[in-house]
Image: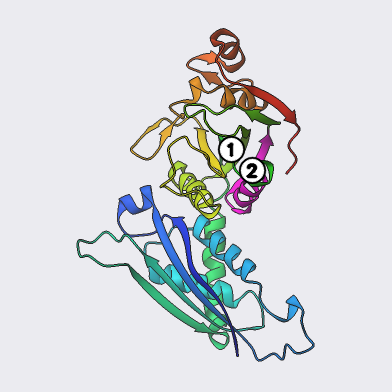
Amino acid sequence: MFRIFIKNLRLYGYHGVREYEKKNGQFFVFNISVYIKDTDFAGNDRLEKTISYSDVIKKIREINNSQSFDLLETFCQSLACSIIGMSELVERADVAIEKPTPPIEEKLDAVGVGYSIKSDDKVTSITDLNKLFKEKGQEKSKKFSAFLSVGSNMGDRKANIKKALRLIKDNPSVDIKKISSLYETGPMYLTDQNNFYNIAVQIAVRNEMGPFQLLGLIKGIEYYMGRKKTEKRYGPRPIDIDILFFNSEEIESDILQIPHPRISERRFVLVPLCEIAPGIKIKGMNIKSYLEEKELSGMVRQISAFVL
């Protein structure tokens, strides 16, 4: 029997019993094994004869980003059932989810939960899971508008931005509504680095994803694309995603401030944002009037339309 495995996948999520776990989120580590029914791959070198680990990772991301579980036991079972339901080729799925920074005093590497399911067990479990997701889906009628700034100055800058937007778009709770043109912008704060590519994006967010959940999605994408916390602040980065506005909310916390606290000084943010949201107010002023009056410094050069 063949085993496809995913080792130490780190994603940011909002799971746990404690209120601050749901509000602030944390990283979770996933280790997954998917067992494929006996197949002779000699002369059958085709993807349809197996399960793509990329599809499994996409399924993990989808559930992690669209649901919030009190118990890792429930999370494990839901994820395992979903993997079993991906294909008739799947004989068994083993799922382990760890909390590397659990809310306990003892010193340890991690705590977690593991769960295994075989294809013979799937009927009741999948039915219950689909019912759960259907009930959750009925709560998704309301949407909020949010605006993001996305930039990159390492590697293939345009490709990095496209990849980040596709990862955002993959989340079932987020729809991309508008994308500005692509702009080349000079670095700010730390000027001894490459120019950035920047865009502004308007998204529609369903009501099960609040601003802190959106922040978790963004931080997970940044981490996945190679951005690490050890990098110098304002230094070079493969991807940088900021929440500029979330509906009409005002938030002041240690990890999130909305509206973005430095938006009013950043021409590289305001020019793309003005293109897709000319009615937005910055410090009580229309954004276009604000840009004309303040005459902010910094090179911002329109490159082309941005097509995802």
In the rendered structure, the answer to whether residue 26 lies left or right of residue 46 reads left
From this viewpoint, which residue is outermost toward the top? Answer: 293
Tally of numbered discs = 2
Identify which amino acid the numbered label 1 is placed on.
Val
User: Looking at the image, can residue 18 be seen?
Assistant: yes
Q: CA distance from mark 2 to mark 1?
A: 7 Å
Q: Residues within 10 Å of mark 1 (few under 14, many from 20)?
A: many
Q: Where residue 303 appears, x then y in whole percent?
A: 73, 29
State whether residue 86 is above or below residue 287. below
Residue found at x 62% / y 21%: 299
The quarter in which the N terminus is drawn is bottom right
Query: Residue 175 appears in which quarter of the rendering?
Result: top right
Judge by depth and name the residue closer to the eye, 214 or 193.
Answer: 193
Magenta part of the chain = 161-179
Q: Position of residue 111 (x, y in %)?
A: 32, 69
Of the 4 image quadrants, the one containing the C terminus is top right
Q: Are marks 2 and 1 in contact (CB under 8 Å)?
A: yes
Q: Nearer the viewer, residue 265 or 68?
A: 265
Residue at the disc numbered 2: 161
Left or right? Give the position of 183 relative to 263: right
Residue of label 1:
150
Q: Is residue 179 left or right of residue 71?
A: right
Q: Residue at x 68, y 41 (%)?
A: 158
Residue 170 in the magenta stretch? The answer is: yes
Give the secondary structure at mark 2: helix
In this rendering, does residue 246 appear at all? Answer: no
Q: Residue at x 37, y 48 (%)?
A: 24
Which residue sits furthest right? Answer: 43
Residue 40 on image: x %, y %: 72, 91
Whether residue 176 is in magenta: the answer is: yes
Question: What's the residue at 43%, 27% (across, down)?
Answer: 261
Q: Tell me if mark 2 has few (under 14), some (14-19) or many (20+) residues whose alpha carbon lies within 10 angstroms of its own.
A: many
